[in-house]
Image (cartoon, coloured by chain):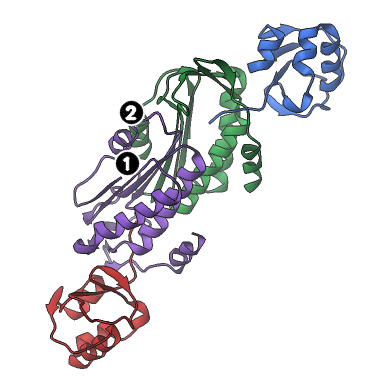
Chain colours: A blue, B green, C purple, D red
């Protein structure tokens, strides 16, 4: 699964995207796995309320299932306009 | 409907004119232009990051919703990304409708949704350093109006 | 502030650009353009009569009120009179402010007040004859919002 | 006093403006005088609720005093914008 990071999430993790092999069934599970990896992931995902997630380029909830999903993106609340 | 996501500068006046051109079924055209504002006089540039795979899709969905809800004759959204200088246009929205209330409301709605639902992130670079612009609670609250 | 009352055609895009030019203290610019709408496909022209001695004065007063109330950086109003063809611009309003809510509200306010308090009268000439456009109760009611 | 007419008020009365010598103290009094003159004035002023008045280029009420006023304008509700 392709995992993409934007804005300060990208900066904290240090890379814009990566391939992740996972058995996680929900976004929350995936986040738990990533946080357990390294300090920089822990720093990025520490406060989930400051984050948003998109699954295959559609905004989603953190308890959404990952089955069939090819692209997960994490980012802070958007500031367009 | 026209949706464009681009790094290049655009000419808001020329876009407004080509959007308005040759219509006799429209009574009201509203445009909004967002400009890089140098609040404290020390902004060097604004960097706009976006999510290329999602941006056009998200804007198109929001714009289609506005067109349907306010029976717009047409709508336009242009949004830039990349480094922008103070005073430069960031984005614009235009709406065309039979009457003014629909054109105003639809443009207002589009701005509220683009602000909080289109995948852009702004970073301000000043002589003190660089900082991501925080989303405001008021912007999220504004969505509840619709 | 710029207020112009004229018979001549104006270029809304060029006016928007010159209004926006070279500002770094502004984050939001809203424009409204009113266009001669040919509702039933039989409009030959729209004649706009006005009260020359009062028009500029009335528009200036309304515009000054909008600038003060929404702390606008600037505002523009152009209104035409005389015979206008379908699709031609009748008038435009532009507002510049730090934030979008002020720019939108002030433009909306200006339109409501210009509609019912600036001394213009529209007459539609169709192949069935000529008729003065009646003021709508809804337009008078719209003023109560402010 | 200069009296000016616009839109269908002008069309019904048949002239865009005229000088009026009057002792009327309010707009209502002036209207009563004009209505008494000729049928075309009666036609223009029959329904006062369909009319607006400006005194020296400011909107006014029909019971406003005319003292010192140099220009009175009668017209239908405005349809600008």
Is residue A9 left or right of C53 when viewed as pictured? right
Q: Is residue B73 visible?
A: no
Task: Reply above or below: A7 against B75.
Answer: above
Task: Reply above or below: C69 against B51.
Answer: below
Q: C146 or B94: nearer the eye?
A: C146
Residue at x 26% of width, y 86% of height: D31
Please provide percent x and percent y for residue C135.
Answer: 38, 68
Looking at the image, is mark 2 or mark 1 nearer the viewer?
A: 2
Please provide percent x and percent y for residue A63.
Answer: 83, 27
Q: Residues within 10 Å of mark 2 (few under 14, many from 20)?
A: few
Residue A45, picture quadrant: top right
Residue at x 35% of width, y 58% of height: C114
Per the rendering, the mark at residue C22 is: 2
Pinpoint the chain carrying mark 1.
Answer: B
Mark 2 secondary-structure assignment: loop
Residue A69, picture quadrant: top right
Mark 1 secondary-structure assignment: loop
Q: Is residue C132 visible?
A: yes
Per the rendering, the mark at residue A67 is: none
Alpha-carbon span between mark 2 and mark 1: 30 Å
Is residue B85 left or right of D20 when viewed as pictured? right
Q: Residues within 10 Å of mark 1 (few under 14, many from 20)?
A: few
The residue indicated by pointer 1 is B22
Pinpoint the chain carrying mark 2.
Answer: C
């Amino acid at each position: 699964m392709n995992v993409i990071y934007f804005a300060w999430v990208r900066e904290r993790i240090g890379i814009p995207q990566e391939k992740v092999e996972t058995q996680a069934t929900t976004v929350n599970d995936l986040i738990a796995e990533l946080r357990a990896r390294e300090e920089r992931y822990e720093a990025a995902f520490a406060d989930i309320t400051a984050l948003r997630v998109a699954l295959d380029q559609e905004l989603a909830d953190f308890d959404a299932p990952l089955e069939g999903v090819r692209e997960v993106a994490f980012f802070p609340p958007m500031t367009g306009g | 409907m026209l949706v464009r996501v681009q790094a290049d500068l655009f000419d808001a006046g020329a876009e407004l004119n080509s959007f308005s051109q040759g219509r006799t079924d429209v009574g009201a055209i509203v445009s909004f232009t967002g400009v890089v504002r140098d609040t404290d006089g020390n902004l060097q540039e604004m960097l706009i990051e976006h999510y290329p795979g999602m941006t056009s899709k998200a804007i198109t969905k929001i714009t289609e919703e506005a067109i349907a809800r306010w029976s717009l004759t047409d709508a336009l959204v242009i949004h830039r990304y990349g480094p922008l200088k103070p005073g430069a246009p960031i984005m614009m929205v235009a709406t065309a409708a039979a009457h003014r209330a629909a054109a105003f409301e639809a443009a207002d709605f589009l701005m509220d949704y683009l602000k909080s639902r289109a995948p852009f992130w702004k970073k301000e670079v000043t002589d003190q350093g660089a900082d991501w612009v925080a989303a405001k609670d008021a912007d999220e609250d504004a969505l509840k109006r619709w």
